[in-house]
Image (tube, grey):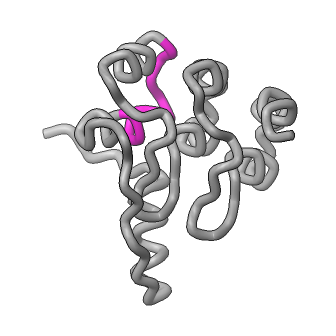
Amino acid sequence: MKPRRHGICHRLSCLAIVAGLLLPSVACAGSPDLDHQLLTRASEATPAELGKLIHAGANVNAQDRYGVTPLMQAVVGNNIAAVPTFIAAGADPKLKDFRGDTALDLARQLGRTDIQRLLVGTTR
């Protein structure tokens, strides 16, 4: 059996539970299953794989119940190649997670300077 990989969604969920936070779910416009796949694959999938999910109907602005988006997942996973894919598909870099951070905020916090350069022009 393959070990389960935990992304930012799981870590944020654990953080929220430990902190005693109960946050509401954010509804997505796409298919919930495709949206979930996009959220979980964004940190490591190739642009081609992500493009297939988007073309199939995954919502590039899907947010989990903590406000985390596929673009944020790509930032956290340092998936530089995914960032232009999401931006070109209409991802909104101004969306905020439950802490009020955008994808650019996360890139700055994590020292992802290459991703910061990609995002800086999109958030004006």
Q: Residue furthest bottom?
A: 20
Screen quadrant of the C terminus: top right
| Quadrant placement of the N terminus | top left
Report the residue at 45% width, 84% height from top: 21
Which image quarter: residue 57?
top left
Quadrant in which residue 98 is drawn: bottom right
Which span is picked out in magenta? 38-47
Q: Nearer the viewer, residue 45 or 123?
A: 123
Q: Residue furthest front?
A: 29
Q: Residue at x 40, y 82 (%)?
A: 22
Q: Report the front residue among 57 and 66.
A: 57
The percent coordinates of residue 4 (x first, y second) are: 27, 47
* Closer-to-camera residue (22/73): 22
Is residue 14 positioned above or below 103 on the image?
below
Residue at image location 23% in from the left, 39% down from the top: 33
As for residue 118 lying within the magenta part, the answer is no
- 57 relative position to 44: left or right: left
Give the residue drawn at x 69%, y 60%: 101
Image spot of residue 111 (x, y percent): 80, 45
Decide: is 95 above or below 13.
above
Please say if 46 is above or below 108.
above
From the viewer's perspective, tell me whether residue 68 is left or right of residue 14.
Answer: right
Where residue 25 sits in the image (x, y, percent)?
37, 65
Q: Is residue 39 magenta?
A: yes
Q: Position of residue 12 (x, y in %)?
A: 48, 65
